[in-house]
Amino acid sequence: MQRNLFSYIWRYSRPEQIVILILVVFAQVFYFLSLSVPKSIVNNGISGNAFKDQALIQWGAIDFSFPAFLGGFHVHLFDGFTVDQLTYLVAMSFVFLAAVVVNGQFRKSINTQKGRMGERMLRRLRYELYDRILRFPPAHFRKVKQAELATMVKDEVEPLGGFIGDAFVQPMFLGGQALTAIIFIMMQNWLLGIIVIVLLAVQMSIIPRLRKPVLVLGRQRQISARQLAGRIAETADGVHEIHIHGAANYERADIAERLGVIFKIRFDLYQKKFVAKFWNNILSQATPFAIYLVGGYFAITGHMDVGAVVGVLLAYKDLPSPIKELIDWDQQRQDVQIKYEQVIDQFQPEGMMPPELQALPDGPPPPLGKELALAGVVVSEDGRVKQLDSLSLTLPLNRRVAVIGGAGSGKDVLAQVLARQTLPASGSIRIDGKDFFQLPEYVIGARLAYVGQDTYLFPLSVRDNLLFGLKLRPVAPATYDEATRALRETFWKESVRAGNPAFDPNADWVDYELAGATGPADLLPCMVRVLKQVDLDEDIYTLGLRGTVDATRRPDLAEKILKARHTLHEHLQDGTYAGLVEPFNSDHYNKNLSVAENLLFGTALGKQFDGDNLAADPYVMSVLQKTGLDVDLQRMGLSIAETMVELFSGLSPDNPLFEQYSFISADELPNVRLLLQRLGGKGADAVPEADRARLMTLPLRYIEARHRLGLIDAEMEDRILAARRAFAAKLPEPLRGSVEFYDFERYNSAATLQDNILFGRLIYGQAQADVRVGTLISEVLAELGLRDSVIEVGLDYNVGVAGKRLPATQRQKLGIARALIKRPQFLVVNEAVAVFDGRTQDRIRDHILASSDGRGVVWIASRPGQAEPFDQIVVMQGGRIAMQGAKADLEARGGLYAELMASA
Amino acid sequence: MNLNEEVEILKGVPLFAKMEPAKLKLLAFTGERMTFGTGQEVCHQGDPGDAMYVILGGVANVLIDTPKGPLQVAQLKKNGFFGETAILCDAPRNATIAASESLLTLKISKDMFYRLVTEFPSMAIEMMRELAHRVEDANQKLREATAANKAA
């Protein structure tokens, strides 16, 4: 990247800058016209100077006279019109209007072009910076803070966009203006002209110097602000450590210190700025002072006439503003130049990957080769401690190799080198004679897979994370309709203009072949197979059961799930499952649902009928009043209140039982007790109006089977059923979308798959009911061949930021699955199974070996015992290979191998 | 069965005999009732224990694993309780309990158990009495077995 902002701008926006310059020059003509036409209007149109001698004049003639040195030809094109004074006035007024409009159009066009050019350059710069982040050597990320990178790309280059439009035009334009004024002064009196020039030169050399400290401070301000962003991100990342160690105040001290430094810088900046401004004003007034003094002296002594002095003064009046703007422009130039340098310095670390290695492949990636040969490889962190010490090793890419060794043996560093994560300081790594580090990244991406101890997951769905390693190039373009296609084309054209690639993230980037599939249709079995290999299928299946499916988008699946519901309910008729589930039946009160759920008898969509909102809804209230259920609810509420007061009165307010079991919170309980005392056993009718609403909400969460206060008898059931029917029958049109009613023959898009299949509630207090019904659901789904479809729904689960919505072990399993799905020719597993229990570790290892199918595996063993089933075992110590060979050989030789095995 | 009926049953359980009715009601309200079908296991020998159970109705078999398969060593009836050892000393279940006929229990979680014992010492005394009986019972059986061994 160019260190000089100007050469950078000029290089990428030359044609645009020239067009704008030409536009500016043309605009001057119309600007001049809009200034000179009023003079003609006043002199000839209104005062009638041109009409003093004749009533009519010629107007609008088109003549050109070439200057004498070009031959002095005279070209006459058009005679013009004969006009009287009034017509002249009207015509000239319209000419003025036209000049103003055209002038405005020019301005608009110039500003638009400047803006577009600036934004394009900003886009190019940002893209280029991001592009560089992708090419940073991996080790560089240990030195830079991510928040600082983000601040630089996002905020710090922002002001550049505004400046780029003015970078060339502004100095040309202002310089031209200033030059004209100076020439005019020179023509009046050369001595005065020289004085003005000298004073201007002084001004232009002193003021930037005064502003120098301002610029230095500006640079400090930029760096300190960037560091502040980095520190805030650190606080967020390490917030658990801060709390655990009680270091909040130490952190406060650090931030306060930083803010203090920033304050000082910013305040100094203000002071320096105003000092510069003060001198700026003084110096700009020095010129008129000189003109008065010297010009006046000349006038008195008769060397110059008074008119000329006034002329010079008038000409000078036009001078300060362009000069001042020029100085301002210069200041801005230096400011953005510093910002630019500051930023790009951070973006050119040594050892950046050449762009060719990241080029987009134009076809399927070629195979990796046959053999990887490491010769004299040295890796050292700071040039002293050698993590790998002239290590030489030959790895045929069809062999399965385990590497064992103690901590500090360098086995993990070896794995990182094999995955190109760490660059050796010296030595060579060749693959069939070619330099391993010069292979394009897509070949590595497609053919080599690496899983380390901690896996980073992107905040996307499980599926997107699983398929992440297959997205090397767009394999099939996205299909667009005619209109969208045209829009996309324009979008890409603009991308190319700003130096961005015209890649389409909507295209299908998944390389199905790598996964062993032929297209999107048969990808699912491949994904399920890999999930099984890492023991993750069951977890994703569970996520799928808890997921939802939109019936309008997947009518086929909704249909099948509905079938599963029918099958399940047939099985539930069976005696072994009696008394486990109470199905939803519109004609029966469901004792295992709350009163609110019984009333609504459906899934609330949105907030309208959700939870306690139900009681606040005016329509629900009207239904309750019409059916008289409001009084029943108040009575039930009173009864619940009495029970709660009886049960929880003796307990301290912070007793967890409140939270878990009470219908009334600990804070509320005393008020309720007071209310009950005032009632003194009188019924619900005596409850004051104000308390009734609250009382009514209490029974909404009441579940007869669970709370067993005996509030709902057969008669009450009928009354609630009547209200349920009334609610559904008269539901106004706008509220229809707020509830999805339970209907045995309809799939419910708002409910989870599990709830859809179950279509009922587990009955309270039945031992193992959840497990038994869960098993039954699994059996039904397996019977109908729906297990994979459920997994497919589970694949849509969003794993959250850095995969935090998945437990650590599942995260790691998904990371391994992501490597396995591309069936890599060479798989490096760097203690990736260490977080699992021993049995799982061995099982996953065996699955990986069983599916390796002639492909190479390098397994960095966290326990030496894991190495057993491998073709070749490499024993490492102190960054060197201590011994290697087949298991039988090593056993025969004993030594370090035997020691390690004995310690396992 | 509603809450008041359950409280009536709990009043008959010696363990809770001296508790006020209001507290019994709280116990019934916050405890979890669990129904087990014939043959269903309440807990399995060796599993970690997280709760104790009070039998409100039905009969439970106490089974111990032997090399020849599970051996029934005792039966627990209404008002009996089990599972307290596992939560008192954080030990695995020392026997398998299975429903011999339809069994209704009140499940008291570990947290709840400690809260109850601290709030109602009478319950702790009752439990000590029951445990002492069991130790005495076991000693008696041991003496008989030793005597039988000597005789043989």
Image (tube, grey):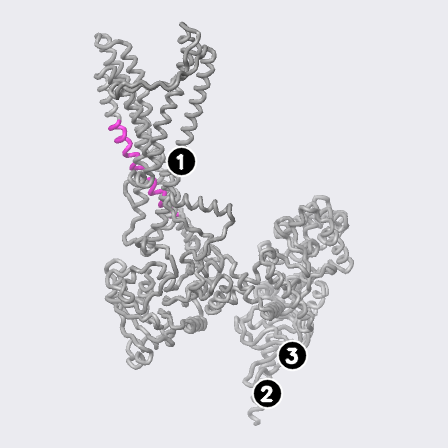
- Counting from the top left corner in percent of width and height, residue A819 is at 41, 64
Looking at the image, is mark 1 or mark 3 nearer the viewer? 1
* Along the line of sight, the residue nearer the viewer: A377 or A75: A75
Q: Is residue A122 left or right of residue A683?
A: left
- Counting from the top left corner in percent of width and height, residue A320 is at 31, 22
Distance of mark 1 from mark 2, alpha carbons? Answer: 102 Å
Q: Which residues are magenta?
A: A204-231
The secondary structure type at the circle numbered 1 is helix
Tell me the residue that label 2 is attached to. B144
**Residue at mark 1: chain:** A
Q: Is residue A754 left or right of residue A598?
A: left
Q: Residue at x 34, y 55 (%)?
A: A358
**Residue at mark 2: chain:** B
Residue type (three-letter) at the residue carrying disc 2: Glu
**Badge 3 or badge 2: first in the primary sequence:** 3
- Would residue A812 be visible to someone looking at this image? no
Residue found at the very far top of the displayed protein: A53
- Counting from the top left corner in percent of width and height, residue A421 is at 33, 60
Quarter of the figure with the N terminus of chain A: top left
Helix, strand or loop: magenta stretch? helix
Q: Residues within 10 Å of mark 3 (few under 14, many from 20)?
A: some
Looking at the image, is mark 1 or mark 2 nearer the viewer? 1
* Magenta span contains residue A225: yes
* Along the line of sight, the residue nearer the viewer: A23 or A620: A23
Tell me the residue that label 3 is attached to. B75
Residue found at the very far bottom of the displayed protein: B152
Tell me the residue that label 1 is attached to. A115
